[in-house]
Image: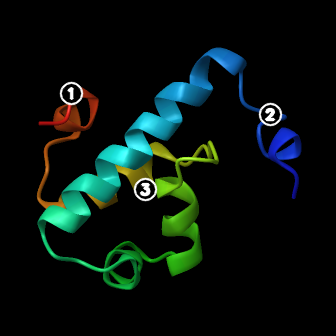
Amino acid sequence: MSKNKQHENIPFENIDDLIDIGLHIAYYRNKKNMRQKDLAAAVGVSQAYISRIESRNEAISFSMNLFISICRALNVRPVDMFRPLP
């Protein structure tokens, strides 16, 4: 799928925020020494889907339910996903 096609249904002003959330997920996952495969198993999605969420080059929207599940699996408060990374 082309990059333009991936962003087709995402409002332009949301793209950077979605990428930023994905980078936060990757940061906290790495901080826990957790592999994408392990996080994926913990929240019931594929490793490829976690990879897409964490990608710097792809904005992917995902459900709030999945977001909360990821936060719980990483033992991170949802609000911390919106704060600047250290």
- Report x, y in % for residue 24: 30, 45
Residue at the (38%, 46%) spot, across then down: 23
Write down the residue under mark 1.
Answer: 84
**Residue 66, which numbered label?**
3
Residue at the (62%, 42%) spot, across then down: 59
Label 2 to label 3: alpha-carbon separation: 19 Å
> Quarter of the image holding residue 72?
bottom left
Side (left or right) of 71 relative to 36? left
Side (left or right) of 36 relative to 52? left
Side (left or right) of 3 relative to 53? right
Side (left or right) of 86 relative to 25? left
Write down the residue under mark 2.
Answer: 9
- Report x, y in % for residue 15: 61, 29
Mark 1, secondary structure of its residue: loop
- Report x, y in % for residue 1: 87, 58
Closer to the camera: disc 2 or disc 3? 2
Q: Nearer the viewer, residue 50 or 86?
A: 86
For the residues labelled 2 and 3, say whether their Cβ atoms are less than 8 Å apart. Answer: no
Mark 2, secondary structure of its residue: loop
Closer to the camera: disc 3 or disc 1? 1
Which class describes the residues within 10 Å of circle 1: few (<14), some (14-19), or many (20+)? few
